[in-house]
Image (cartoon, grey):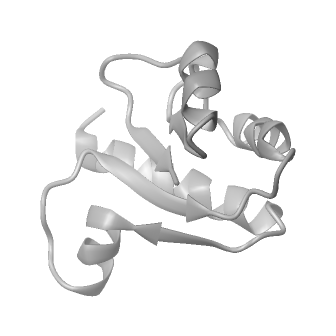
Amino acid sequence: MPAAEQLAQGLRRLGPLLAEWPFPAAVIGGIAIIARVSPRHTDDIDVVVTVPDGRAHEFLSIAMRHGFSHNPGETRELLEGGLMRLFLAPSPAEDAIGLDIL
């Protein structure tokens, strides 16, 4: 699937995920610039999501129900810094579109 279609599919899945999550979130980075200013190249989706202490696994569970995956080892490491990385694929892969959760 072309990268542009993967990004569009990621955004289509992200909307319902964020609608289900009861805390504030915002799309930032290249996708936000594309939506508000002008087209540019990007190969991931950057999102700021409010995840209260102790609720990261709940967020991951909701994300997985919406078709996202993650690498458990990477997730443990990134969570220490308050970050997550999700993938638009059944499992993380080299060519999967990533969602960087800040």
Compare residues 56 and 46 and report the one nearer the observer.
56
Compare residues 14 and 54 and report the one nearer the observer.
54
Q: Give how far across and how far down residue 60 sits, in percent.
A: 74, 38
Q: Give how far across and how far down residue 70 sits, in percent.
A: 59, 25
Compare residues 35 and 56 and report the one nearer the observer.
56
Give the tally of numbered discs: 0
Q: Residue at x 53, y 21 (%)?
A: 74
Q: Residue at x 24, y 38 (%)?
A: 2
Compare residues 95 and 82 and report the one nearer the observer.
82
Quadrant assignment, res 64: top right
Residue ranking furthest to the bottom: 36
Q: Taking the image as drawn, is residue 69 in sight? A: yes
Q: Taking the image as drawn, is residue 70 in sight? A: no
| For residue 36, above or below residue 87 | below
Q: Residue at x 84, y 68 (%)?
A: 22
Image quadrant containing the N terminus: top left
Q: Is residue 31 left or right of residue 55?
A: left
Q: Give how far across and how far down residue 32 sits, in percent.
A: 34, 73
Quadrant assignment, res 35: bottom left
Q: Residue at x 54, y 36 (%)?
A: 86
Q: Is residue 85 left or right of residue 3?
A: right
Q: Give how far across and how far down residue 45 sits, in percent.
A: 39, 53
Q: Is residue 15 left or right of residue 2?
A: right
Quadrant assignment, res 12: bottom right
| For residue 23, above or below residue 89 | below
